[in-house]
């Protein structure tokens, strides 16, 4: 399947831009890539929100709580973690805000979006992860106050947030002996070095503009920034593919067809299945990395949001359909 027009029709903005570094050094290239990164969006679902802070080991952690209409005591909940290469992103980016609103409405769920500390200004692993673990514990311990069934709490994230969500689930298993109802990992990065794609996948990825690719060099730089040093510092909490994943909760794992991170997600799905984890693996066809930053009017995005909502609404496991 070819690249969806929601992406391909805007590739002209990226012509002649070899890398993000080159774009940042040239005002015109920077303008064009910013225009590409800010696609037109439809109206956001109207959801009640409130901004709070929860206690964390490095200080207060800002969170935004999205609540469905009406009151309840047995509602599901999703702790949601945005992406951004561990160093970008916030609660207002579409991948954070629009996704939270969509899942809140579609699943009738309380969604808690976490503004974890980014790996900038000397911040490195495990600080962002510590914030996420603190937020997950707060959600679990505050379930009654939020009108949430503690047995229907789910954890999820996209890209770097998918890494952090998976690592949070590992920490909760090892430190608390507790697992959420499910893990929802969307185009996550899980290996310190991306597995090599097959020839077929590599051919498909060659259709993606260079500035949108996760090259080995770019990935190494992102990961070194997160770790605060060389790959030898990586462990199962910084890159969950290095962990023993036995006993993890049911998992919905989604990879994008035209995404270099597809290989890390697919390999991790195999790892989960080999460990006996209930994992549903989904290929989001025709889309690139970061597709949750697009409007739900784009059919592949709508389809994945529907899967996510069904998973969160389901009482115990990842549904088969």
Image (cartoon, rainbow, N blue to C red):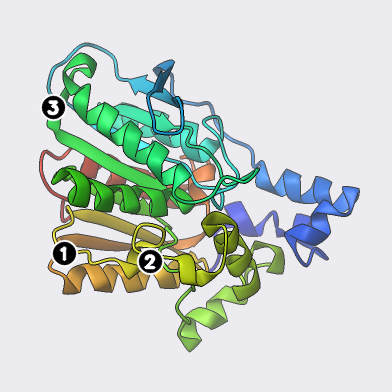
The mark that comes first in sequence, 2 or 3, is 3
| Residue 178 picture quarter | top left
Q: Which residue is drawn at the image coordinates 55% and 30% (left, top)?
A: 92
* Element type at mark 1: loop
Residue that numbered label 3 is attached to: 149
Whether label 2 touches label 3, CB < 8 Å: no
Residue that numbered label 2 is attached to: 265
Quarter of the image that includes the C terminus:
bottom left
Q: Which residue is drawn at the image coordinates 65% and 72% (left, top)?
A: 217
Gap in angstroms between the C-alphas marked 1 and 3: 25 Å
* Image position of 295 with respect to 282: above or below: above
* Element type at mark 2: helix
- Residue 43 percent location from the top left of the image: 53, 26
Q: Nearer the viewer, residue 137 or 48?
A: 137
The mark that comes first in sequence, 1 or 2, is 1
Residue that numbered label 1 is attached to: 246
Classify 10 Å Cα crowding around label 3: few (below 14), some (14-19), many (20 and above): some
Gap in angstroms between the C-alphas marked 1 and 2: 17 Å
- Residue 6 percent location from the top left of the image: 59, 52
């Amino acid at each position: 399947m070819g690249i969806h027009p929601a992406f391909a029709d805007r590739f002209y903005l990226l012509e002649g831009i070899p890398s993000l570094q080159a774009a940042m050094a040239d005002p015109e290239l920077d303008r064009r890539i910013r225009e590409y990164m800010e696609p037109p969006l439809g109206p956001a679902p109207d959801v009640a929100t409130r901004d709070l802070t929860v206690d964390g080991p490095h200080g207060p952690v800002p969170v935004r709580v999205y609540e469905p209409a009406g009151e309840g005591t047995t509602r599901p909940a999703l702790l949601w973690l945005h992406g951004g290469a561990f160093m970008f992103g916030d609660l207002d980016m579409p991948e954070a805000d629009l996704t939270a609103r969509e899942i809140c409405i579609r699943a009738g769920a309380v969604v808690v979006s976490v503004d974890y500390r980014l790996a900038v200004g000397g911040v490195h692993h495990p600080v962002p992860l510590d914030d996420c673990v603190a937020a997950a514990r707060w959600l679990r311990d505050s379930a009654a106050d939020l009108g949430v069934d503690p047995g229907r709490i789910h954890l999820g994230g996209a890209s770097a947030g998918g890494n952090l969500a998976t690592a949070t689930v590992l920490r909760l298993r090892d430190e608390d002996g507790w697992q959420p109802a499910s893990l929802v990992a969307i185009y996550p990065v899980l290996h310190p070095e991306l597995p090599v794609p097959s020839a077929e996948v590599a051919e498909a990825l060659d259709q993606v503009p260079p500035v949108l690719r996760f090259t080995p060099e770019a990935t190494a730089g992102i990961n070194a920034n997160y770790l605060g040093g060389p790959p030898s510092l990586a462990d199962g909490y910084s890159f969950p593919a290095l962990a023993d994943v036995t006993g993890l909760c049911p998992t919905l794992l989604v990879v994008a067809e035209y995404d270099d991170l597809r290989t890390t997600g697919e390999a991790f799905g195999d790892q989960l299945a080999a460990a006996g984890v209930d994992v549903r693996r989904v290929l989001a066809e025709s889309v690139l990395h970061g597709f949750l930053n697009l409007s739900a009017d784009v059919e592949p995005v709508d389809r994945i949001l529907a899967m996510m909502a069904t998973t969160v609404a389901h009482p115990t496991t990842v549904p088969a359909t």
